Amino acid sequence: MTLERNGEGHLRRIRSFVRRPGRLTPAQQRALDTLLPRYELDLALADVRDAFERSAPLVMEIGFGNGEALVAMASAEPGFNFVGVEVHEPGVGRALRAIHAAELVNVRVAMRDAVELLARQVRPGSLEQVRIYFPDPWPKKRHHKRRIIQPEFVGALATAIGSGGLLHLATDWAPYAEWMLEVLDQCDAFSNLGHPYVERPEWRPQTRFERRGQGRGHEIFDLLFARR
């Protein structure tokens, strides 16, 4: 998450991401052209739940990367509706191809800032779960302000998640896990279900990104919080 200053020194709005350029393959570009209109969350909707043809508990994955976990979860948990949030075009293109190949009807994709989405289209208490897996740790101290897990963002999640709902975080960067714990512990709206961490819940699939981190000797940390 970032809080930037414009040329006049005024603070701009908080964003949940830092956009990085990416090179699209022809297949990814075709997916954006042909599949995004089918699976994209309609910006005109006042309530994200109305994007689906059925009523079901809603799970939001923020920063789904290439969609590997999103597709696996939506396939394994057909009783949930899923909204995946990601702005990196190559990743979205790859995810769209996988969603379409799996013929998933319980997934919508939002290529926009999660902060804006939460504020404009997510009604208070309407989310059953929010899942944020392996966000950029921004390890350098001067970049810590770019981390998505910040008090302001956690406050927005607390508003969006209903009573008893879950916030599930995962990281392979130990200092970021400690940061997450510190930020969440300061929010009275959430209760930590771990001591302080939990074993990987069965609903979180292991991804290539996670296995790569393990190959580098990184420990994996899962944090699970319940909305009071």
Image (cartoon, rainbow, N blue to C red):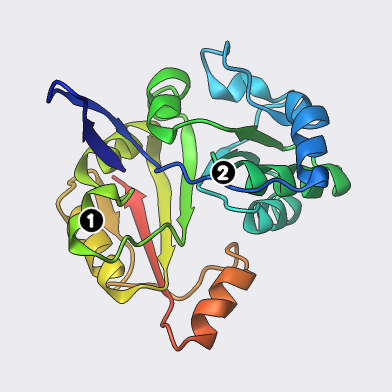
Q: Is residue 31 above or below residue 78?
A: above
Identified at 14% across, 20% down, the residue is 8
Amino acid under label 2? His
Check whether the beta carbons of the residues at disc 1 and disc 2 lie within 8 A of each other: no
SS at circle 2? loop
Which part of the image, by quadrant, shows the C terminus?
top left
Residue 224: % across, % down: 38, 61
SS at circle 1? helix
Identified at 31% across, 38% down, the residue is 158
For residue 144, which numbered disc appears in the image?
Answer: 1
Identified at 24% across, 64% down, the residue is 140
Distance (Cα) linking label 1 and label 2: 20 Å
Identified at 51% across, 83% down, the residue is 214
Q: Is residue 94 above or below residue 111?
A: below
Residue position for label 2: 88
Identify the mark nearer the N-term, 1 or 2: 2
Amino acid under label 1? His
From the viewer's perspective, tell me whether residue 215 is left or right of residue 146. Answer: right
Which part of the image, by quadrant, shows the N terminus?
top left
Q: Is residue 152 above or below residue 175?
A: above
Residue situated in front as seen by the camera: 224 or 142: 142
Which residue is the extreme one toward the front?
A: 7
Residue 141: % across, % down: 18, 62
Residue 127: % across, % down: 47, 35
